[in-house]
Image (cartoon, grey):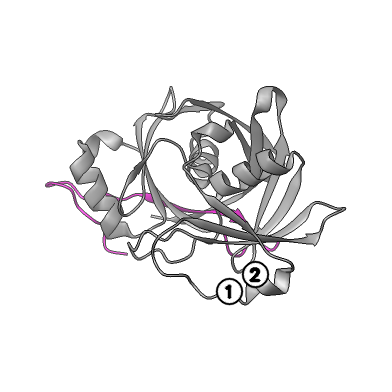
């Protein structure tokens, strides 16, 4: 794609897909600007995130310490799940420093994992439905509440069907894969989950010591 610009220098973010399915398809698109210093200031970063149009864009302010700044097309976030999973994988770091707190990270075979606290996640309306078919049949709701619609596919096995509707009115009508909402659902249910979200993304979660939650999935580098 044509490189967005912020000032005289072209900006070429890495583009990832996070929480890909078992066949490597799907996943939520993520932009990562490795040298955040090339886009100084919240206003310029917000504008670039809006122009890119991904559900989130990450600006890396220190690639050794893992200091990151996360934006949707319309807002700055103190923490978000799929940006942290993707950025930790891309930079191969053991932790990221978000405005909400320090997120630990690890790699386990094909899965990239982070550990974070539920209270860091932005507010979400977790709405349970009776069946996966009901979730599949949902229309995109009008802008308003951020809704995470979910149902058990197999409760005994911890398998969940989910869809996410940000409701921000900023062009992202449905999130393909949402780590923060999966984290909140895991904290509420108190058990490990295997979530199929969107068109076919996969998110794995597990409770962690001290009330934290692990969130993991596959990450693929698409390009710049």
Residue at horizontal 31%, vertical 58%?
52
Q: Is residue 3 magenta?
A: yes
The residue that mark 2 highlights is 135
Residue 22 appears left or right of 176: right
Residue at horizontal 32%, vertical 54%?
73
Picture coordinates of residue 120 (x, y %)? 50, 33
Picture coordinates of residue 162 (x, y %)? 64, 61
Q: How many marks?
A: 2
Picture coordinates of residue 172 (x, y %)? 40, 63
As measured in the structure, the alpha-carbon distance from the residue carrying label 1 to the one carrying label 2 is 5 Å
The residue that mark 1 highlights is 138
Q: Is residue 183 magenta?
A: no
Residue at horizontal 65%, vertical 34%?
213
User: What is the chief secondary structure element of the magenta stretch?
Assistant: loop
Q: Residues within 10 Å of mark 1 (few under 14, many from 20)?
A: few
Give the residue furthest to the right. 156
């Amino acid at each position: 794609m044509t490189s967005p610009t912020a000032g005289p220098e072209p900006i070429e973010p890495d583009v990832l897909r996070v929480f890909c399915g078992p066949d490597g398809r799907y996943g939520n698109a993520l932009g990562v600007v490795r040298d955040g210093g090339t886009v100084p200031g919240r206003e310029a970063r917000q504008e670039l995130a809006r122009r890119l149009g991904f559900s989130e864009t990450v600006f890396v302010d220190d690639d050794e310490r893992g200091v990151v700044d996360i934006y949707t097309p319309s807002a700055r976030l103190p923490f978000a799940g799929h940006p942290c999973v993707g950025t930790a994988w891309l930079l191969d770091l053991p932790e990221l420093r978000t405005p909400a707190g320090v997120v630990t990270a690890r790699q386990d075979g094909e899965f990239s994992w982070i550990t974070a606290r539920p209270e860091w996640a932005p507010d979400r309306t977790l709405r349970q439905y009776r069946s996966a078919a009901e979730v599949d049949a949902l229309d995109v709701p009008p802008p308003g509440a951020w809704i995470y619609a979910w149902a058990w596919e197999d409760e005994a096995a911890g398998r969940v069907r989910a869809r996410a509707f940000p409701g921000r009115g900023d062009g992202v009508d449905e999130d393909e894969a949402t780590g923060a909402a999966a984290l909140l659902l895991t904290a509420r249910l108190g058990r490990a989950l295997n979530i199929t979200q969107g068109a076919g993304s996969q998110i794995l979660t597990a409770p962690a010591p001290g009330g934290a939650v692990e969130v993991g999935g596959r990450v693929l580098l698409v390009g710049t």
